[in-house]
Image: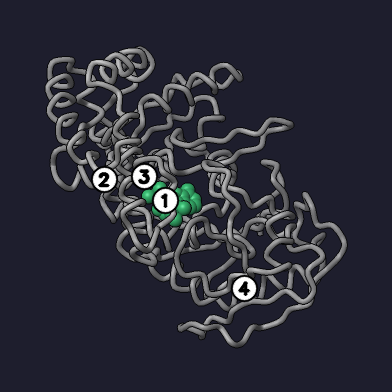
Amino acid sequence: MSVTVVVGAQFGDEGKGKIVDALVKKNGVRLVIRYNGGANAGHTVVIDDQTFKLHQVPSGIFHPGVTCAIGNGAVVDPIQLSNELNELQRRGVSTNNFFVSHRAHVVMPWHPLLDLAAEERRVEKIGTTGRGIGPCYEDKAARRGIRVGDLLDQATLRAKVQELWELKRSDLRDFPELLARLPSAEQILGNMALCAGQINPRVWDVDEMTRLRWRAGECILLEGAQGTLLDLELGTYPNVSSSLATSAGACVGSGLPPKAISKVICVAKAYTTRVGNGPFRTEQDNEIGERLRQQGQEFGTTTGRARRCGWFDAYMVKRSCEINGADGIVLTKLDVLTGFDPIRVAPHFIKYEPIDYYDCLPGWTESINDVTRWDDLHENARDYVKYLEQACGTDIIAVATGPSRDAVIWR
Ligand code: IMP
């Protein structure tokens, strides 16, 4: 009986998709639940010569027979989800074992517009993904949101859409251009009916199913989106997303009790990136940052925006490991640091900005791409990993050395 949580230790984009995909196979996982966030996420899995970018569907979907579900803590854009499922099917990936919680909230067509309006109003911009995530969670907290279960009952859905449409139209009245993009209530209902064939049969009591399967002793993985520093409660507020991204959020967002969690894995990139605004102490707004961006192809999976890049911040990752109760770290994209010499790290004891001191570690120039054995890794790369392990006070249980699904060293 094991329940593993996979959570981002930085600002999202740590490479969780690839690690979830690998862990499903390695640990014989039978059920994967995506527990927070929505189509703001972009989880990439590279299988042979094919790259899949998942936004809402859990990254376990490539394993036949594994059930994948969106939990109650996530928010669902039904039109985008329907497109994502169609695209997976078109590319030969079975989605028969995919389900979505009837309790998850629905991102409605007015939410992205309200997201843009809220951003426009802010003096200090957050730099949201514009996917309507914040406004959808706002409606959830205000207890007026539409839930996935409502999609099954035409009369309830119609009544809710009509009522909320009036309210949202009035919320958008100061933004005529955005208001002009708001479809009519009838159009919205029509568009939702178009994807009902794809979505409605997938609606399920996911939290009950998860508890049943946990009690039956199945191996379960809870897949987090975004990262600890984007968590609504413990991230760099207000520059955060609106969901609960931490391991505690995994319980809330899946319906499993805290005592069910047997293992927490924090995924951290070998350097740091951030999309959108907000504090980033080790940012390199210079040639080093540009080189990291190009070598690491640091452009948003969802928005295509250039990610801000900088050195590894050991204080930040250590703190994330403590918040999540990490049993181990998976370090990703180590290969991207090839050619950087020295490699700098903000030490674990520097809590406050600005960072005026970095530890310097020797780099390496030989390619470490796709190395799968620890002993085959360049000595300086191994020393870098060991240094980070010490600094973060948590074992680094695996190191990713390239985008492909097998480019992982399990230690
Ligand atoms: P929102 O989630 O669209 O409201 O955006 C809030 C903040 O979180 C912005 O800075 C986004 O760039 C960031 N963000 C949201 N989702 C992701 C993600 O999956 N990866 C990285 N950053 C994200």
Q: Which mark is residue 388?
A: 4
Q: Earlier in the sequence, mark 2 or mark 3?
A: 3
Q: Earlier in the sequence, mark 3 or mark 4?
A: 3
Badge 3 marks a residue whose secondary structure is helix
Q: Quadrant of residue 320?
A: bottom left
Badge 1 marks a residue whose secondary structure is loop
Residue 180 visible in this rendered orientation of the protein: yes
- Residue found at x 66% / y 83%: 359
- Residue found at x 72% / y 32%: 48
Within 8 Å of ligand 1, the CB of disc 2? Answer: no
Q: Quadrant of residue 391?
A: bottom right
Label 2 or label 1, whichever lies nearer to me, is: 1
Within 8 Å of ligand 1, the CB of disc 1? Answer: yes
Badge 2 marks a residue whose secondary structure is helix
For disc 1, the neighbor class at 10 Å (few under 14, some 14 to 19, many from 20) is many
The residue where tag 2 is placed is: 137
Q: Quadrant of residue 189?
A: top left
The residue where tag 1 is placed is: 128
Q: Which mark is residue 83?
A: none
Q: Looking at the image, is 283 positioned above or below residue 119?
A: below
